[in-house]
């Protein structure tokens, strides 16, 4: 057998014709490429979804930083008392023009985020502040829809630390709308909210 292979190789080398690939060799190469593509595409798509989710979360954090700057100046999230989130939209837009802010005090067109750079905003009096008969709008909810189809919510409560609920919390959902009004119920210490 080995001698037959050697003779065949010697005969091939004796020919002046250029040798080519056989059909089987070409099929093996095509199969290897197909397997590698089959492995690479799902990994690429997963990385793409993670990148889209990260972009959405980053935009929420930028929006919260802007809102906290406003809170520092006014000690409330709405800019003009009594106007709710609507009064805050124009100020937030002026402070962070790279994002589009939407009034998230309602649901539907014009209130719901449809892209990572669209941030739905709603503010309210936090539960600890309500219990203390406070009227300061010290809680804000931001919503952003990722390109992957997930909706991310960021809730921030500016209450005294003694209340135990102050801080920032993140939640996500794949069902329902993506307006700040659609955020999960206020259960800041339990899922679906996770502390940041």
Image (cartoon, rainbow, N blue to C red):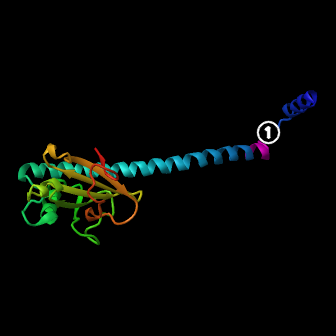
Farthest residue in the bottom direction?
A: 109
For residue 169, above or below residue 105: above
Q: Residue at image x 32%, y 53%?
A: 171
Q: Which residues are magenta?
A: 20-26
Residue 98 position by quadrant: bottom left
Farthest residue in the front direction?
A: 131
How far from the left and from the top, in percent, is residue 51?
40, 48
Q: Residue at image x 89%, y 28%?
A: 6
Q: Quadrant of the N terminus?
A: top right
Residue that mark 1 sits on: 19
How far from the left and from the top, in percent, is residue 79?
9, 59
Q: Residue at image x 78%, y 47%?
A: 23
How far from the left and from the top, in percent, is residue 84?
13, 64
Give the crowd class for mark 1: few <14, some 14-19, many >=20 residues within 10 Å: few
Question: Is residue 169 magenta-colored?
Answer: no
Residue 76 position by quadrant: bottom left
For residue 39, above or below residue 88: above
How far from the left and from the top, in percent, is residue 33?
64, 45
Q: Nearer the viewer, residue 58 or 153?
A: 153
Question: Is residue 22 magenta-colored?
Answer: yes
| 182 displayed left or right of 139 | right
Residue 90 position by quadrant: bottom left
Q: Quadrant of the C terminus?
A: top left
| 148 displayed left or right of 129 | right
Q: Secondary structure at mark 1?
A: loop
| 36 displayed left or right of 58 | right
Q: How many numbered callouts?
A: 1
């Amino acid at each position: 057998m080995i001698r037959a292979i050697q003779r065949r190789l010697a005969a091939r080398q004796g020919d002046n014709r250029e040798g080519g690939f056989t059909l089987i060799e070409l099929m093996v190469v095509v199969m290897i490429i197909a397997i590698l593509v089959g492995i690479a595409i799902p990994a690429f798509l997963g990385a793409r979804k993670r990148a889209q989710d990260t972009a959405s979360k980053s935009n929420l954090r930028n929006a919260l930083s802007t809102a906290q700057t406003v809170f520092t100046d006014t000690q409330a999230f709405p800019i003009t008392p009594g106007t709710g989130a609507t009064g805050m939209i124009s100020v937030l837009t002026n402070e962070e023009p790279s994002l589009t802010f939407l009034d998230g005090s309602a649901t539907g067109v014009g209130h719901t985020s449809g892209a990572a750079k669209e941030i739905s905003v709603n503010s309210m009096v936090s539960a600890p502040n309500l219990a203390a008969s406070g009227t300061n709008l010290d809680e804000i909810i931001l919503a952003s829809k990722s390109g992957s189809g997930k909706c991310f919510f960021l809730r921030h409560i500016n209450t005294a630390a003694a209340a135990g609920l102050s801080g920032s919390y993140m939640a996500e959902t794949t069902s329902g709308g993506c307006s700040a009004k659609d955020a999960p119920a206020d259960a800041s210490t339990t899922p679906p909210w996770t502390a940041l």
